[in-house]
Image (cartoon, rainbow, N blue to C red):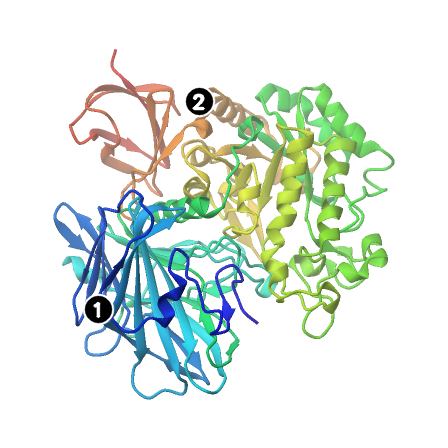
Amino acid sequence: MIAGRNRIALLSIAVGLCFLLADCSKLAESPMTVKTVKPAPTQPSAIHVDVKSGGPMTLTTSAAEFQVAPDGYVQAFLLQSGRKVSLDEPKVGSPAESDFVRVGGKDVHFTLDFQQVEVHEALGKLGAGKRVEIRARPLGPTVADLEQVLALEVYDNFPNILLSTVEYKNTGASPVVIEKSVNQRRRLNAQLHGTKAGPWEMWSFHGASYDWGKDDVVKVTPAFSQPNVMGEMVKGGYGGGIPVVAFWTRQVGEAVGHVETIPISAAIPATVAVDGRVNTEVDFAAEVTLKPGEIYSTPRTFVSVYAGDFYEPLRIWSSVLQKEGWELPKPSNEAYNVSWCGWGYEADVTPAQMLGTVPKLKEMGIKWVTLDDRWFDVYGDWNPRRDTFPGDSIKKMSEDFHKEGMLTQLWWLPLGVEDGEGKYESHKYGMAKVVREHPEWLVQDKNGKHARMTRGLAVLCPAVPEVRAYHKQLTEKFIRDWGFDGSKLDNIYSVPACYNPAHHHKSPQDSVNAMGDIYKEIFETSRALKPESVTQACPCGTPPSMAWLPFIDQAVTADPVGAVQVRRRIKMYKALLGPESAVYGDHVELSAMTKVGKDWKEHGDDFASTIGTGGVVGTKFVWPDPGPRFKDVNLTAAKEERWKKWIGLYNQKMLSKGEFRDLYVTGYDTPEGYAIAKDNEMYYAFFTSSAWKGEIELRGLKPGRYQVSDYGEGKSMGTVDAASNGVAKLTAGFKDHLLLEVSSER
């Protein structure tokens, strides 16, 4: 099996390997000193490449410097006002071993030959840049005859990131089995800036989807360790993720990951070693057998160095993928409107309960209504339950909401089907009609049994064309025939690898890589039927999957455990999808939660964490009072007053349509700050877990005098003067949150 199909090549020596942007004939050339290969005329790159015969080789951009040591370790420095700052601390006295492979259970390491370096002017989608290729030989006796070529790419328009691909050629007479490739191995130390902090004392972001409710933004501790498996489904039905792991201090940050446009299987483990240093790397389970003369090429990985928190590396990563083929759609205008969800009534909600809320929805200015989980009979067939939605009542309910000027959204879970085995909560699984009629569509595991995804469901294989057509038909039924205006796609992570021989896959990973095709079909079909439709995707409790991220109108903070996760996930999605993207803050009730046994009691009312960060407001209250079972979400008179105030404020300001500005550093700026630019004004939101009083910095302003108001409480805060550095200072005291509107003094 060869992982990462779009960048991993296994070719015979007769054919050779063509690197992206490189001359295929280079493999046959004799050893030489530094050689500059001139391509067709193009705008020359301003990046400087300096090669020393014994190393290091240095690539210098307008923002960073990347030093390549003889063992391949790329030490990344951020250039700041004439200084070079870094988290990288290669281990003294032993090879840092940045890129290597495992053969026969043993690691094969290499040393770069700086006498054999080729420097190319890059001609790629990322614009002008440099591409450097360096040959390497094994370090000492090894279990295999392999030659390594390290290819590095740096681009003028992306000065903070270095891309890397490594090829391994079998130069021996016997086959070589490459079990695993290790790339971008890092050793990070927070003490390099002269601070008294421990070497591990930094903040981190982990894009893996592996367990519901875990923080993806974490302060590193001496005992920290996380596997960060990406792409393929993992235990519990989770998986997918964003293949980026980032670390930062107040001075500098560093991130690693891969920039392939499909969700290839990888791992980016992060661990604090016994010496207190933070170790991370990008691993691929290659499982490749190379015949003599054949070549294995790794997926394209990266190291990025930057100032700030996780926002910057995620923004860079997304920008690179957009150049490489990602097309992020502009959200529907309707994606910014407030949403009410029927999940307050839980699984047995009826049309009467849904429609009964209309008076309050209209009073509050709520436009979207979501019919949530368990309206259907069987996963996979997606027909209405006869006990709660008999006849055509689901279609009629949607029509009735439309008559009130509201839009409707339908919950469903693509690819999951019931095959007569298992259950989820109180719902025992039957046999879906689609399974009876098309058992050949199902994903099979290595043992020939039905593979399982989230909720223990069987899985329709997304790589099968008929499965894509089936999901198009389902979307047409929901949007065109029943009249819904969009989909809430929930509990979506990844899918299992598929070993079904009837599918004739080139690799079991075909199912994982094709998952995005299903979501593209749903999104494009919805848009074609209703241009203002909204497709929302929820990876409950975890970061999203890159497989389906480009095929949504609205991201969602995905069952956040409290307001801190609401804020940080909104910032994450603004980095990934753009500063004006629509990010649903999920039900406001989730902004405060208490663990009760294995469940959570939801009792939040923190609208500020969604409004102040540029998210879209939502709620799941029940009304009129249906009894004590629903008391936690019942819209009491006191709650109604608060809900009206904050929803009205959201509709008035519409900061979700503003431009999110990355001006504050998570973990280091106190109080926690956010900024949004809209209609020639700046809006700031500050948060604290306890009462706070002191001086606040209002960043990102043009020099001048400004009026400041607390728009959350509707009161003036006086005036401030912004200095030449764009910062104004305001003395204030508050508890929980402070929302500020800053306008030029007229």
Q: How busy is the neighbourhood of tag 1: few (under 14 within 10 Å), some, or many (20 plus)?
A: few
Q: Is residue 440 above or below residue 413?
A: below
Residue annotated with mark 1: 33
Three-letter code for the amino acid on which mark 1 is drawn: Thr
Place residue 257 in its image quadrant: bottom left
Q: How many labels does the image show?
A: 2
Which quadrant of the rendered structure holds the N terminus? bottom right
Q: What element carries label 2?
A: helix
| Residue 57 drawn above or below residue 369 | below
- Residue at image location 71% in from the left, 54% down from the top: 416
Going 33% across and 22% down the picture, which residue do you hit?
A: 681
Quarter holding residue 504: bottom right
Q: Can residue 344 be seen in this view?
A: no
> Which residue is under mark 2?
653
Q: Which of 404 and 475 is in front in this view?
A: 475
Query: Which element type, helix, strand or loop, lies under badge 1?
Result: loop
